[in-house]
Image (tube, rainbow, N blue to C red):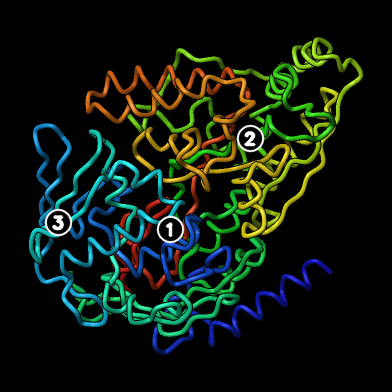
C-alpha cells in the first residue's frame, strides 16, 4: 500500500510538472523543493529549503561560493572599510538591472536593508547597522554601531529587491509573480501548495543563462523524490537521503557527488518546559540525556555511517573560528546517565515529554528523533516523538513551546552564526532561550562573548572568545551537537552543473550538454 501511494504521488508530480523531464521539448529543468514556498518575498521565511529558491531570483551584495568555502562580491563592486571599522562604503556593480528592466540603484539597496531591519527575524543580521544611506546612485554607506567582522554574511543574506515594484504591488507582493529581483530567473507561475515555474531573465547582468525554463515542484516525501529522479522526472536532486545513495548512484552514473556538509544536526532541550513538574529544568536530567545519546547510532541511521559525529556547532576544518577543544563533551555512557538520573531523584527513570521535529517522516531529523527516543529508553528515559510540517513546528520551537527537539543549521562560514541560537536579539531564530527571568545560566556572559567575537578581526582572539562561549553552552546541557551530514547531489545525464555544492546552488551556472 505504501509503495502504491508513493507511485501515485510520483504520477501527480509528473502531471504537475506538465511532462517528464527527459521528454520535454523545451528542455524544462525540474527541481524539487522539499516543502512549500509560502511567499515570493524572500523576507517571509528563513527556511533553507526556501532560501535555495530565492537564490535563483534574488542576489545580495555578496554571494557565497560553497565550492571554495567563502564569500565573494556579487552586486557589490568594491567595499571600503573605515579605519575604525564602523563605516562600509559599497560601490555597486555597473549595468545591473532588475528583471522588470529598471536599473538597480543605491536607493534600492537602502530600501531592501531598511525592510530587513524592520523584520525581527533578521535582527541577528542587521542589529549592528546604525544607518544605511545612498551617497549617490552607485554608492551605499553603511554605518555600524560597533565593529562587526562577520558582516560578509549579512551582505550575503540580505537580498536586494526593486523598490518601485515592491511598493507598487503593496500587500500583494510575495503572493503573485514579480520581477523585483536581479537574479537570473523570474517567476511566471506560482502556487503555494505545488510550486512555481520560472523563465530565464535574458537581460541578466552576467549574461543570459543557458537553462531557459525551470520548475520547482513540492515533493516533501523523500521516497517519492527518489522515485521521481529514477523516473527522470527531476533533472537535479540535492540533499539526497543517504540510505538511498547507492540506488541514486546506479541511476545517475557519474552525475553525482557526495559533498562534505557545512551543517549541524543537534538535540535541543527546553529547560523552561513545564512538562512533568519542569523535569527538564533539572541539570542532572539534561546531562543524563546527553550521556544517553549514541552519536554513532545517529550517524548510521541518518547518514549510513558517512557523516561526522559532532562536538562542534560548525566543522572547524571549514570554519576557522570554530572551537576544537576547551569545552565539555558528552561521550556515550549509559551507566553514567543512570547515575545522574538517580542523583536527580529518578532512580526508576523519568518521562521527559515529546521529541518534536519537522520535515518528512523519512528525513534526517525524523530519523534522528527515533534514534534519540531509543537511546534515551535504554537509560530509563521515556520520550514520545512527534514529526510535523515545518510551518507548524518552527514557530513552536522559536516560542520555546516544546520539550526536546531535533533542529538543524546550514551553510555559514563564520562561527558568529552561533549568535542566532544563543543571543536574546535572535527572537524568532533560537530554540533555547538563555536569557530569561528564571534562567540559571550566565546569559550575560554569553552575549558579551558574542559581541566580543565580532568586535575584532583577529582569528586567534575570536577563537578564544568563542571557545569560552561554547564552553558555557555545553555546560548548560541544553544543546547537544550530534552530526555533520554529508550532502548527496545527483543530476540528469543531459545536464552539466559544473562543480556541485552542498546547499546554495545557482541554476545560472548550469547548462545543457
Task: Please tell me which residue is depicted at 17% across the width and 38% down the height of the picture.
Answer: 86
From the viewer's perspective, is residue 169 above or below residue 225? below
Task: Please tell me which residue is depicted at 14% across the width and 56% down the height of the picture.
Answer: 140
Which sits in the foreground, 20 or 282? 282
From the viewer's perspective, is residue 460 above or below residue 319? above
Tell whether 227 sits left or right of 349: left
Q: Are marks 2 and 3 in contact (CB under 8 Å)?
A: no
Name the front one of labels 2 and 3.
3
Tell whether 174 sits left or right of 142: right
Q: Earlier in the sequence, mark 2 or mark 1?
A: 1
Q: Which residue is mark 2?
A: 268
Q: Are marks 1 and 3 in contact (CB under 8 Å)?
A: no
From the viewer's perspective, is residue 400 above or below residue 103? above
Q: Which residue is mark 3?
A: 140
Q: Position of residue 76 (x, y in %)?
A: 16, 56
Q: Which residue is mark 1?
A: 254
Marks 2 and 1, how far apart at CA: 38 Å
Q: Quadrant of residue 4?
A: bottom right
> Dot 3 lies on which element?
strand
Amino acid at each position: 500500500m505504501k509503495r502504491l501511494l508513493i507511485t501515485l504521488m510520483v504520477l501527480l508530480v509528473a502531471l504537475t510538472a506538465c511532462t517528464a523531464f527527459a521528454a520535454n521539448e523545451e528542455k524544462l529543468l525540474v527541481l524539487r523543493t522539499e516543502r512549500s514556498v509560502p511567499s515570493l518575498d524572500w523576507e517571509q521565511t528563513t527556511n533553507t529549503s526556501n532560501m535555495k529558491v530565492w537564490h535563483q531570483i534574488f542576489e545580495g551584495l555578496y554571494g557565497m561560493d560553497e565550492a571554495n568555502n567563502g564569500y565573494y562580491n556579487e552586486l557589490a563592486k568594491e567595499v571600503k572599510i573605515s579605519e575604525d571599522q564602523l563605516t562600509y562604503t559599497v560601490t555597486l556593480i555597473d549595468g545591473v538591472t532588475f528583471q522588470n528592466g529598471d536599473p538597480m540603484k543605491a536607493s534600492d539597496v537602502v530600501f531592501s536593508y531598511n525592510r530587513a531591519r524592520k523584520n525581527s527575524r533578521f535582527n541577528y543580521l542587521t542589529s549592528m547597522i546604525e544607518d544605511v544611506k545612498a551617497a549617490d546612485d552607485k554608492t551605499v554607506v553603511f554605518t555600524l554601531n560597533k565593529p562587526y567582522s562577520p558582516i560578509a554574511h549579512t551582505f550575503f543574506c540580505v537580498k536586494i529587491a526593486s523598490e518601485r515594484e515592491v511598493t507598487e504591488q503593496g500587500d500583494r507582493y510575495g503572493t503573485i509573480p514579480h520581477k523585483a529581483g536581479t537574479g537570473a530567473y523570474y517567476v511566471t507561475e506560482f502556487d503555494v501548495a505545488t510550486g512555481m515555474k520560472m523563465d530565464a531573465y535574458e537581460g541578466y547582468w552576467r549574461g543570459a543563462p543557458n537553462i531557459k525554463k525551470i520548475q520547482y515542484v513540492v515533493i516533501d516525501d523523500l521516497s517519492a523524490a527518489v522515485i521521481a529522479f529514477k523516473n527522470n522526472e527531476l533533472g537535479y536532486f540535492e540533499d539526497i537521503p543517504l540510505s538511498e545513495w547507492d540506488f541514486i548512484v546506479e541511476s545517475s552514473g557519474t552525475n553525482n557527488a557526495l559533498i562534505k556538509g557545512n551543517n549541524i544536526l543537534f538535540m535541543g532541550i527546553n529547560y523552561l518546559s513545564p512538562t512533568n513538574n519542569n523535569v527538564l529544568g533539572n541539570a542532572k536530567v539534561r546531562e543524563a540525556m546527553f550521556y544517553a545519546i549514541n552519536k554513532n547510532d545517529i550517524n548510521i541511521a541518518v547518514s549510513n555511517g558517512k557523516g561526522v559525529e559532532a562536538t562542534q556547532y560548525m566543522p572547524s576544518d571549514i570554519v576557522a573560528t570554530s572551537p576544537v577543544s576547551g569545552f565539555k563533551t558528552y561521550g556515550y555512557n549509559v551507566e553514567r546517565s543512570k547515575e545522574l538520573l538517580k542523583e536527580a531523584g529518578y532512580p526508576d527513570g523519568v518521562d521527559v515529554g515529546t521529541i518534536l521535529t519537522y520535515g518528512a517522516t523519512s528525513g534526517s531529523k525524523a530519523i534522528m528523533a527515533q534514534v534519540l527516543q531509543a537511546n534515551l529508553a535504554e537509560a530509563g528515559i521515556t520520550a514520545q516523538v512527534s514529526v510535523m510540517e515545518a510551518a507548524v513546528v518552527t514557530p513552536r520551537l522559536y516560542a520555546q513551546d516544546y520539550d526536546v527537539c531535533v533542529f538543524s543549521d546550514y551553510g555559514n562560514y563564520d562561527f558568529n552564526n552561533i549568535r542566532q541560537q544563543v543571543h536574546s536579539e535572535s527572537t524568532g531564530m533560537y530554540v533555547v532561550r538563555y536569557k530569561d527571568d528564571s534562567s540559571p545560566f550566565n546569559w550575560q556572559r554569553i552575549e558579551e562573548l558574542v559581541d566580543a567575537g565580532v568586535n575584532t578581526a583577529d582569528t586567534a582572539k575570536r577563537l578564544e572568545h568563542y571557545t569560552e562561549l561554547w564552553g558555557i553552552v555545553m555546560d548548560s546541557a541544553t544543546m547537544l551537537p550530534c552530526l555533520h551530514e554529508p550532502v548527496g547531489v545527483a543530476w540528469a545525464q543531459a545536464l552539466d552543473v559544473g562543480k556541485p555544492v552542498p546547499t546554495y546552488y545557482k541554476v545560472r551556472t548550469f547548462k545543457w550538454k
